[in-house]
Image: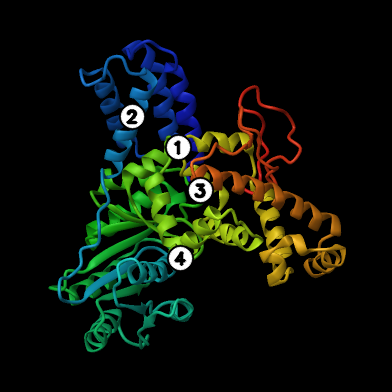
Amino acid sequence: MFDNLSDKFSEAFKNISGKGKISESNIEETLKLVKTALLEADVNFKVVKNFINNVKEEALGEKVIKGVNPEEQFVKIVHDELAKTMGDKNTELNYVEGGITPILVVGLNGQGKTTFSGKLSLFLSKKEKKNVLLVPADTFRPAAKDQLITLAKSMNMDWFDSDLSKHPKDIAADAMAYAKEHGKEIVIIDTAGRLHVDEELMGQIKEVRQGLEGLNPEVLMVADAMTGQEAVNVAKSFHEAVGLTGVVLSKMDSDARGGAALSIKHVTGVPIKFISTGEKMKDLELFHPDRLAGRILDMGDVLTLVEKAEAAIDKDDAEGMMKRLEKGKFSVNDFMKQMDMMKNLGSMASIMKMIPGMGGMLKQVGDLTPAENEMKRMRVIINSMTKKERDNYKIMKDSHIKRIAKGSGNTEAQVRDFIAKFKQMEQMMGGLSKMMKGGAMPGMPGMPGMGGMPNMPGLGGKPKKKRKKGGKWGGGFF
């Protein structure tokens, strides 16, 4: 997410690193690099000009705290201005109290409208505890109805069997009547898209909205985050013609340039309400400008990580594991549950980017795909073990290892290697158990003065070179 923009900002900030104070002379070059970075990210030039002027004024103003690291001050100023440019704070959906809230999903073809409709239904159902109805209203692309119904079935969501021979405004009216009869709180209407903005498309959406007048509908436009300024222009056209209440940025898991996210609110006045961060139905987040600014500047996004953890981690499983740890017990089953928890949080790279300072470290480590592939291989090995073996790996003999290797498609050496690494993990977790009871910090290889963690697949094993400080990359299962 905005990797290129993050890199450019990091390079720019080096110009004031080690300076005694912020002055016009030492931030001039930094501001030039920041300006170039924003323009290359396809941010609207008026937004860039306003951004640079505001940062410069704030940096040279009396509000700068004396005695604090100038680079940290400057980064904080840039962070706050980025958040302000994107909207300052999250703007929530406006629900109709005691009634039904209609949500029109609009946009051009190929932006991800139907997928977003499915994601939003799951989000509102699971997180907001709303009774949701999905409504296919794309009369130009019948396959969109099949796609939406397939998504609804996969998530066990309710859908309306629209008659696509009718006008979309009549489909919407029928759906609202059905929703009222069946006690629905939210009606998500997936409308038709086009390859470009045209009068027919706008006229159709206007009629649908007019039919919902008095019901205070939400009108959300889905825009591809990779299209930069084009997404801003489309949003402006939709807003002028229909009146948007919010924008959704899709494909934020790609290397989006950032132009759309940083320009839409400033240019159109319409807030970004959601961002789509992956292909799975659960990969939808509320848009928080301050948090995204933190990710761009490698300051992390701990709040979103905590929210993801709360949603992904089973509380009973976590408490059970803690109780076992307190008793000094850690089995292969426990390790499997840890891997499942990590998988539910997202990819290793996405998790690391949410931890302050880890974005830069991630660039040093490089591609994490081998590490994730190694974890998949471990999962196959564990699934080939019996329940007794997962509860107590020490009962395994040569015959057990041979059977597991054959069942998992691995060599016996690879199975033994997994067991050896698990032993190291077990020892480390045993040390953690002692620490929890008031003992000393367990030895953890790879950290200065604290031993070394077992080799982490894909992050080394046999590292190419040692770091000058802090040991070496290498480290256990996580």
Q: In the shown orientation, is residue 323 left or right of residue 84?
A: right
Residue type, numbered disc 3: Ile
How far apart marks 1 and 4 lie (CA) works out to 28 Å
Q: How far separated are the C-alphas under marks 2 and 4?
A: 39 Å
Numbered disc in front, either 2 or 4: 4
Q: Is residue 276 visible?
A: no
Disc marking residue 453: none
Question: Considering only order in the chain, which callout, 4 or 2, is on the residue closer to the N terminus?
Answer: 2
Q: Which residue is mark 4?
A: 316
Whole-angstrom CA distance, mark 3 to mark 2, is 22 Å
Q: Nearer the viewer, mark 1 or mark 2?
A: 1
Query: Judging from the image, what secondary structure is the residue with disc 4 in?
Result: helix
Task: Decide which of 302, 76 is in the foreground and name it.
Answer: 302
Q: Secondary structure at mark 1?
A: loop
Percent across and percent down for residue 304 are 39, 50
- Mark 3 or 2: in front is 3
Residue 450 picture quarter: top right
- Residue ID for mark 2: 76
Q: How far is mark 1 from mark 3, CA to CA? A: 11 Å
Measuring 21% from the left and 21% from the top, which residue is drawn there?
63
Spot occupied by residue 40 in the image (x, y as percentages of width and height): 46, 35
Residue shown at the point (19%, 75%) measured from the top left: 212
Tag 2: amino acid: Lys
Residue at the disc numbered 1? 356
Q: Amino acid at mark 1?
A: Pro
Which label's residue is closer to the chain start, 3 or 2? 2
